[in-house]
Image (cartoon, rainbow, N blue to C red):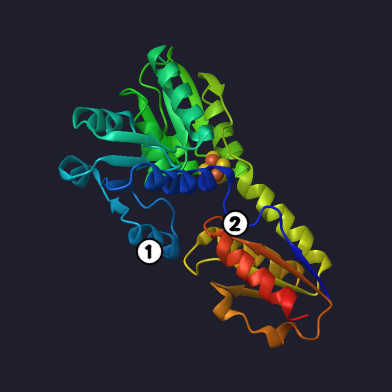
Amino acid sequence: MSVELAKTAGFCFGVKRAVDTVYQQIEQYRGEKIFTYGPIIHNEEVIKDLRSHGVEVLNDEEELKTADADVVVIRSHGVAKYIYDILEERGITCVDATCPFVKKIHKIVAEKSAEGSYIVIVGNGEHPEVQGIRGWAGEQVTVVQTPEDAERFELPDKDQKVCIVAQTTFNYNKFKELVEIISKKRYDIVVLNTICNATKERQTEARQIAARVDAMVVIGDKRSSNTQKLFEICKEECLNTYYIQTLDDLDINQLRSVESVGITAGASTPNKIIEEVQNNVRINF
Ligand code: F3S
């Protein structure tokens, strides 16, 4: 039997970099109190493991203001500028693991704002990444998520320039649709497509593998929306698609009669879990 593991399975570049950064700090700052600002990743196993190494999570600004912290790691989503200011005021060492692609958006937004442009962020206003991006613009900023939001958007000063950026994980077709609605208003617009391809590439590869194997295994947390999406995509191509959280959920008997198995994993699935599943499938055949 052949086993094919997707190259894009698991952490994207930015998340891997952030998780690795926290582990590096454990080595570098032994005995110091290390925190992450928000969970470094939405995966219970990883958070538990970090806690066992003494790394705790700060959930919000209030906790940051009072925490007895020596080192704070900023996760891949990035944060608003004022969070860096609080860290500096409090004399806490800041280790910045913001994904470089997100950092680039911060830079664009800060520059365009300083030049007097109105900033439109296409994305989900509740998402920490968008809140972080927002925190690099001045007062003149809005978040647009739906066609209705885009219709409603009106520039206070019609001669002002508009700069549109996107949340990195936003759907490209939806982004295009919202940009078109805003474009009809005939403002002076600069559109910067800041969507990251990591999610799209993971989905495309999963679909291709699922289409050529007899069974497909998708690994990820049950609550992870990007893993659910991966599962749906694979199921469309391959009826024998199984959604598991860890090796314990895998019923190897289901794979006994097949000749080829594909494996992929959601964006927050640690490599350790992917390896365990892969090795187990290989050993059993
Ligand atoms: Fe990941 Fe960075 Fe893209 S965190 S999804 S590589 S923007």
| x, y percent for residue 83 | 28, 34
| x, y percent for residue 248 | 55, 80
In the foreground, 156 or 250:
250
Q: How many marks?
A: 2
Mark 2 vs mark 1, foreground winner is 1
Q: Residue at point 41% right, 64% down?
A: 44
- Tell me, yes or no, if residue 66 can be seen here: yes
| Label 2: how many Cα within 10 Å (few below 14, some 14–19, many 20+) | many
Q: What quarter of the picture does the N terminus occupy?
A: bottom right
| x, y percent for residue 233 | 68, 63
Residue that mark 1 sits on: 48
Residue 84 placement: quadrant: top left
As shown in the figure, which amino acid type bears the numbered disc 2? Gly
Q: Quadrant of ligand 1?
A: top right
Residue that mark 2 sits on: 10
As shown in the figure, which amino acid type bears the numbered disc 1? Lys
* Mark sitting earlier along the chain (2/1): 2
Above/below status of 158 relative to 88: above
